[in-house]
Amino acid sequence: MGLDFYYLPGSSPCRAVQMTAKAVGLNPQHCIPTLVDNGFSLWESRAIQVYLVEKYGKDDSLYPKDVQQRALVNQRLYFDMGTLYQRFADYWYPQLFAKQPANPENFKKMEEAMGFLNTFLEGHKYAVGDKFTVADLALAASVATYEVSGFDFKPYPNVQKWFALCKTTLPGYDLNEAGCQEFKKYFP
């Protein structure tokens, strides 16, 4: 029994798991992120990413063993889950799925979250230094979702530079792009 991955192609957390699987040489298939590995079930995209790297990664480059570096990777993963992606969802999902009007306060919170990411990236090539990690895979999936929504990145030069680099260097980014195009049809 191998890996079974259940996902929604348009979902940025699902795309992040797909890119992580690609980065460690796996090719999961099937469909919301739930991973079944030889009978072991795991859900929550960032937990799946870490599991894949710890179990199948050839080294610790995607999820460093150094306690401080790993703490920063974890912080960025939690930031992605609890702030960056959540604020996107808080602003867009009521509009897209419940036909509610846009909430300007929630849009300001999205901008604030992107500002935090811009600050994290100051002086760094990637989210936690000069090598990409699982944090970059997760963050890139979320930022790509912001991009397909038409979000303006001009006020965030560090994000622009990092995201352009991610598009050309992250393994499996083509999977992310395909999922984004699927999700794009929901936006006005």
Image (cartoon, rainbow, N blue to C red):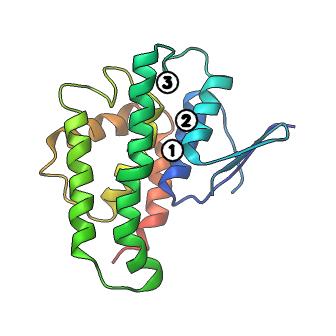
Residue 69 visible in the shown view:
yes
For label 1, the crowd category at 10 Å Cα-Cα, with few meaning under 14, some 14 to 19 and many 20 or more, is: many
For label 3, the crowd category at 10 Å Cα-Cα, with few meaning under 14, some 14 to 19 and many 20 or more, is: many
Tag 1 secondary structure: helix
The residue lying at 69 percent from left, 42 percent from top is 28
The residue lying at 51 percent from left, 51 percent from top is 13
The image shows residue 85 at horizontal and vertical percentages of 40, 55
The image shows residue 131 at horizontal and vertical percentages of 37, 21
The image shows residue 49 at horizontal and vertical percentages of 57, 37
Dots 2, 1 in contact, CB < 8 A = yes
Which corner quadrant holds the C terminus?
bottom left
Q: Which residue is mark 1?
A: 16
Q: Which mark is residue 20?
A: 2
The answer to whether residue 17 is left or right of residue 165 is right
Tag 3 secondary structure: loop
Most extreme residue toward the left is 155
What kind of residue is marked 3? Answer: Leu
What kind of residue is marked 1? Answer: Ala
- Compare residues 20 and 113 and report the one nearer the observer: 113
Dots 3, 2 in contact, CB < 8 A = yes
Which corner quadrant holds the N terminus?
top right
The image shows residue 138 at horizontal and vertical percentages of 45, 42
Task: Kindly indicate the quadrant of the structure image that contains residue 109.
Answer: bottom left
